Image (tube, rainbow, N blue to C red):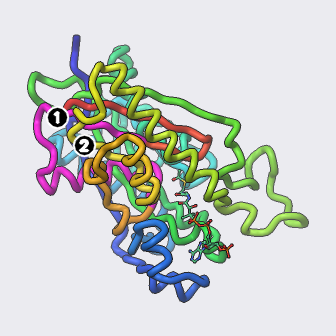
Amino acid sequence: MIRIGISAIGCHVPERVVTNDELSKLVDTSDEWIVSHTGISERRIVAEGEAASDLGVHAARKVLQRRGIGPEDIDMIIVATSSPDYPFPATACIVQHQLGAGKAGAFDLSAGCTGFVYALDTAQALVAAGSARRVMVIGSEVLTSVTNWEDRNSCVLFGDGAGAVVIEALDDDTGHQIVHSWLRSDGAGETALLRPVSGSRNPFDPARHTAADMQIQMDGKRVYLFAVDAIVRTIRALCDHQGIAPADLAWIVPHQANLRIIEAAAKRLKLPTERFYTNLDRYANTSAASIPLAIDEMIDRSLLQTGQWVLLVGFGAGLTYGGNLLRW
Ligand code: ACO
């Protein structure tokens, strides 16, 4: 059986760092509250006019350079995002043009913060089916452009960033194999996390709608409970399928939403919290970009060793959830 997986990774975050103290000048909050309830200390925010495709292109160029290939070597570009440049055309098409990837198809994938996990499985399937030789998967988000900066319940949670990987058939002993993926959705949670206005359900009506109606609305408690359950179910499902125990995982790389969600899931699985890699203290919730941003940092810190079981787990708007089991 051919091994298909990640052959290279590259990430990009905006330069501007925004601390919790700076947010406390916008809304009634404090560094102490944000750190104790979420684990977040700071986040990156784009410069004015910078969009998801811009961050995605930076990450894509980095991954091409690391892989030692050119844009014409990519057959498909998938951008997982909940903050696309436009409702249409797809952000992936803009990335494709900017990169000069003249032989690539391009589409966006909407699965909330689970987008990267969904896109990895999609890319693997395209390669396995022979539809594409190399797929570039990019998680890119500028969620701060659709954040309600007057809502302290949500505005402290998000940050901007992008991460890109190349998915392809791997030579022996190179790359990081995607062994199995498990994807789920609970559409009954439609209203738990959404931007209610500007789609076909509620087209923008200046007589009835305000800017806040087009921004992120979140039922924090509901998302919290869902997220803890989603992490536990995903890890158990992937481990059961592979015939391994959660304790056999060298690392779990969760979507970086909130430290308390991760701690609660670790406790339910009877795993040490340290087994879950986190960097949300510095980047906050970057949605579909959070998992590649974490992996890139783990590589930089030499935390990942060949042969280890590494499990990626995501959860987000939809409500979607799921994971990918990797053999590093
Ligand atoms: N600063 C100060 N006080 C705040 C803030 C803030 N930034 N936000 C909320 N509060 C207040 C609330 O108004 C409330 O005050 P009240 O009791 O006077 O009404 C109080 O804090 C407690 O509110 P809770 O909702 O009980 O706070 P909780 O401890 O549950 O934490 C949080 C809220 C962090 C949002 C939590 O529910 C959570 O983590 N939910 C998951 C949401 C999440 O991670 N979303 C990310 C996007 S979704 C995704 O990535 C899948």
**Quadrant showing the C terminus:** top left
- Name the outermost residue toward the bottom: 25
Secondary structure found at label 1: loop
Which disc, if any, is residue 179? none
**Residue at (54%, 40%) from the top-left corner?**
111
Res 311 seen here: yes
**Quadrant showing the N terminus:** top left
Magenta range: 285-313
Estimate the x, y position of residue 236 in percent, counting from the top left: 40, 30
Secondary structure found at label 2: strand
Estimate the x, y position of residue 208 in percent, counting from the top left: 88, 64
**Residue at (15%, 50%) from the top-left corner?**
303
**Residue at (30%, 44%) from the top-left corner?**
271
Relative to 128, is 177 on the left or the right? left
Q: As displayed, is residue 204 above or below residue 282?
A: above
Residue at mark 2 = 251
Q: Earlier in the sequence, mark 2 or mark 1?
A: 2
Which disc, if any, is residue 308? 1
Alpha-carbon neighbours of circle 1 within 10 Å: few (<14), some, or many (≥20)?
A: some
Quadrant housing residue 285: bottom left
Estimate the x, y position of residue 66 in percent, counting from the top left: 17, 46
- Say whether residue 302 is magenta: yes
